Structure formats: C-alpha cells, structure tokens
Image (cartoon, rainbow, N blue to C red):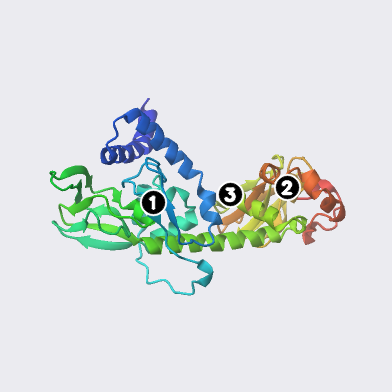
Amino acid sequence: MCDNAEFVEDDFKPLMVKFTISHVLEGPEDVVTYALNYFKALQEARERYRICQEAATISTEVTEVPEGDEIDGPQLEFRRNCVFSDDYNPQEDFGVDKVLHEKTDEERAHIVNTVCDTFPFTLLDMNQMNCVVDAMLPMDVIAGDDIIRQGDDADKFFIVRRGVYYVHSSDQGKPTKLLAVLDQDGYFGEKALCHRTEYPYNVKAMTDGELWVIERYVYRRRVTKAAFYKRKFDEELINCMPYFKDLSVSNRMCLVDNLVHKVYAPGETIVKVGDPSTAIYFVVRGIVKITIINDCGLEVTINELEKPDYFGEAAYLWKKPRSFSAYADDNTEVEVAYLEVDAFERTIGSIADVLGKVFKSHQLKTRPSDSTNDDQSVCF
C-alpha cells in the first residue's frame, strides 16, 4: 500500500497539477468532457513524434481554424482563429549558435521534468530535448515586474525557476480575473513555441525570482535542425545495409521513419543468445562486442563493431533464435538504432515478397573474425 502511494506521489501528482492549471485557465462547463479531451490530446501529442522527424523545413503558412476546433489540445493558452508559422530551412542555416548557458544536472532535470508532459515538448526525442534545454537562458525578475502582457506578441516560453507569479486576465469594463498562481514551479507561454499568436493573459512577478526563457524562433530552429540532421543520419544507416539498396527511395524513407534509437550503459546486454530474432541493429556510437558460445561451452568474443557496422540481419532471413550475444563495451556507453521486422512488414510489406530476390543474390555480411565458419547458425 505504501509503495502504491509513493508511485502516485511521484508520477501522478505532477500530471494532475498540470491538468488542474489547464482546467482553471480554460474554465470549461463540463469538467468530465474536458478531462477526456485533455488526456486524449496528450496521448495523441506523444504519438506525433514522427512528425518532428519528418520536418525538413517549416514553411510560412496561414491556416484558418474553424470556430470551436482545437488544434493543439488543451494548453495554458486560449485559441485563436489564425495561425502563422515561421520560415526556416535547416539546409540554408550556416549560422553559429550564440553562447549557451551552462546548467547543472539538477537544473536540466528540473526543466525536463517540468515540460516533458507538455505539448509541444511531447513531440521531442531526447536529442531534441537536450538541444532545447541548452538554448534556454536565465532571466532575473524583481517583484512587480510584468513578465508578459495580455495582447502582446507571444514570442517566448517561460519556466519558473524561483519565485511566485500571478496569471490573470482582464477584459474592458470587467475586474481582473486571477487564473492561476505559479509558486516556485510551473511554466507559461507554451503556444508561443508553436505559432504566432498573442498572449491571452498577464503574468506578474509577486516576488523576486528567476525564470528560464527561450524564444520561439530559437526553439523551432534548434528542434527542426536537430530533426533534420538526425533524419539524414538515419538515412545513411539504412543506406549502408546492402539488402535495402534496391528498395525505392520512398520505401527506404519508410524504414528511416521506423528506426528507434536506444542507449545502453557500459557492459549492458543488447541481445542475448537464444533471444527471438526480431530486429536488425545499427551501431550509432560506441563499441558493440559480439560473443558466441564455443564448443567448450565458453562465451568468447568474436568481433567488435563500431559505426557504421550493423548486426542481427539474420532476423530478416530466418525466424531463428539469436546465435550470438551483443554487449555494450565495458568502458563506454553505446547507442544503437534498431529496425524491427514487424515495422518493416507493417509499412512496406512481406520481407519474402519485397526482399526475396535480394536474399537470393546476396550473402550475409562476412565478419573477418568468423569468416572461416560456414555454419549459418553463427550468422548475426
């Protein structure tokens, strides 16, 4: 019972606090319907990660949003009928980033924990999140400062680092309405990161404090640039696999979209002998040790792989258990990208149908360390 209580305290409470703030700001009449829409939008936002990966450019556009439609799910800000996006092409960006503010591990963790469940941060992978965190700058405030004013151009996003802040709105001829109190924690202005709009409320510092701040253009520039170069890198991984070279460009791009990156600690097991063969792995950084069990029953290292090596391609040939184990090097962490067989067949079609002719004309990649062994069972 105590363990469950701790779980709720650590994971459930922050999520509900963010929901409560959103509910207070929006003021819906039906709280149940609003809650259903809120968490549905949050779930959908998490699944839209692939959209960011596909973004090579951000084009200028004007989109008319029908009255009553939500475009980003329930957030801290109100809706507008017109959305303007900024112009940015990462291929034409040769600029050098400004000096970034160094942050402690605790400061970085605080920023990530504050926004990890908030759109548009739910779309970011860890590399993109780190790029955004790097670009956030500290901002000192004193009691009485107006951080943002209702109706001003929304071009910045803020995270509370320290201090107490009142969020309030004002309509002509009506008293000021207090919407929320941010006490030593919280954020505001998140829709400024998505599109051009106006702040729908005021934020005033009630005490001296500090904020983290990032401008919309800097955010979009760093996220889009990171996604663009990550996608190019993933394309190179797919293109280094000889079995995929005869696929159409569109099919190879489908495989790029389904690559999943994962980091392993030094010495951690990546695959174990006897595991089902479900994916092919590409080495992104670090050293991967490949081992087999020899005739004496001893586990011996037969190869060490580095970028741009790959392993596990036998999963695309035979539905057999792994004949080898793969470990991250004992001294460095390792990052790999893997492509599951199910993902291939789900997006392109049956491997036998798509790659059948390729398999007949190609042999498995020969590793120098096991080139004298012709037994297919040791292929990896």
Circle 2: residue type: Phe
- The foreground one among 30 and 10 is 30
Furthest-top residue in this view? 1
Q: Residue at x 33, y 55 (%)?
A: 197
Residue located at (87% from left, 51% from top): 360
Quarter-of-image position of residue 137: bottom left
- How far apart are labels 3 and 1 at the CA level? 25 Å
Q: How many residues crowd around disc 1 within 10 Å: few (fewer than 14), some, or many (20 or more)?
A: some
Q: Circle 1 is placed at which residue position?
A: 112
The N terminus - image quarter: top left
Residue 119: image location, x then y, percent: 40, 47
Front position among marks 1 and 2: 1
First of labels 3, 1 by sequence position? 1
Cα separation between marks 1 and 2: 37 Å
Q: Where is mark 3, residue-wise?
A: 268
Q: Quadrant of residue 138?
A: bottom left
Residue 349: image x %, image y %?
73, 44
In the picture, the disc for residue 212 is none
Q: Which residue is mark 2?
A: 324
Q: Amino acid at mark 3?
A: Glu
Determine whether 334 is above or below 279 in the image.
below
Q: Which of label 3 and label 1 is nearer to you?
A: 1
| Residue 317 appears anywhere in the view | no
